[in-house]
Amino acid sequence: DQQVKQNSPSLSVQEGRISILNCDYTNSMFDYFLWYKKYPAEGPTFLISISSIKDKNEDGRFTVFLNKSAKHLSLHIVPSQPGDSAVYFCAAIGGTSYGKLTFGQGTILTVHP
Amino acid sequence: NAGVTQTPKFRILKIGQSMTLQCTQDMNHNYMYWYRQDPGMGLKLIYYSVGAGITDKGEVPNGYNVSRSTTEDFPLRLELAAPSQTSVYFCASSSTGYGQPQHFGDGTRLSIL
């Protein structure tokens, strides 16, 4: 049972344009969401998060939007840069999970110069 | 600033062998986690710990054991290696179980042949 889903395995974007990565979840107990970025041969690194009491959180070029009614969140990267090319994971926490993250499958983002 | 350190980075085991994956963190974090990542999949939680002497099972604990005798160290033990345990293993830590991002090590790539 995949509780967090990233339905796009890959995304290709031109440098300077917007990248939009999507994530859907099914567990209504999830109330804190995170995006991680992962380069090959490295561990995931934290990018940005959002609590369910908000619908938007912004950090520089990165903005995360949360639509609780649709159980959907998205990560916007504007403008996209070649260094943003990586795998992006959506993750969720909720309930009595002691911080246990439930991850999506990941989306490979490629930003072309 | 070391953060979370995992050793070894790579290992090849024969079926039935045992080994311990080491994880240490220098951030004085109470919460520590072990995940595995299979190709094309998100990370899945194996075991976690909320403090020294306290551990609990995650989503995929079968075939693994953990211990937490100190705040810094959280080793993962494979007793009888099986091909299904071929994966990349990530250790992570966080200061709290909720609301703070987890910091990941760079992973151990394990092959069981």
Image (cartoon, coloured by chain):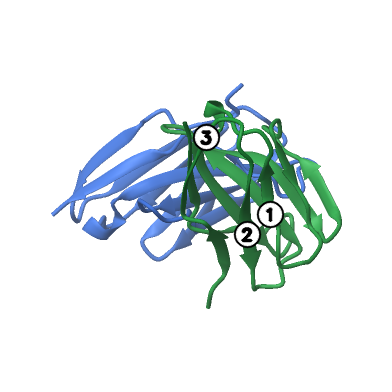
Chain colours: A blue, B green
CB under 8 Å between discs 2 and 1: yes
Tag shown at residue B75: 1
Say what amino acid the circle numbered 2 marks: Cys
| Residue at 68%, 54% in the rendered image | B75
CB under 8 Å between discs 3 and 2: no
Residue A8, compared with residue A39, is above or below; it is above
Q: Which residue is mark 2?
A: B23
Estimate the spatial distance between the alpha carbons at disc 1 and disc 3, rounded to whole Å.
20 Å
Q: Reading the chain from its start, which is encountered first: label 2 or label 1?
A: 2
Look at the numbered disc 1 and give the secondary structure of its residue.
Answer: loop
Residue B39, compared with residue A85, is above or below; it is above
Let me know if marks 3 and 2 both belong to one chain: yes
Along the line of sight, the residue nearer the viewer: A12 or B30: B30
Let me know if marks 1 and 3 both belong to one chain: yes
Along the line of sight, the residue nearer the viewer: B48 or B16: B16
Look at the numbered disc 3 and give the secondary structure of its residue.
Answer: loop
Tag shown at residue B99: none
Estimate the spatial distance between the alpha carbons at disc 3 and disc 2, rounded to whole Å.
22 Å
Q: Position of residue B84 (x, y in %)?
A: 54, 27
Q: Which residue is mark 3?
A: B14
Q: Position of residue A14 (x, y in %)?
A: 17, 48
| Residue at 30%, 46% in the rendered image | A19
Along the line of sight, the residue nearer the viewer: B105 or A55: B105
| Residue at 56%, 40% in the rendered image | B36
| Residue at 55%, 54% in the rendered image | A49
Q: Reading the chain from its start, which is encountered first: label 3 or label 2?
A: 3
Q: Reading the chain from its start, which is encountered first: label 1 or label 3?
A: 3
Estimate the spatial distance between the alpha carbons at disc 2 and disc 1, rounded to whole Å.
6 Å
**Which residue is farthest left?**
A113
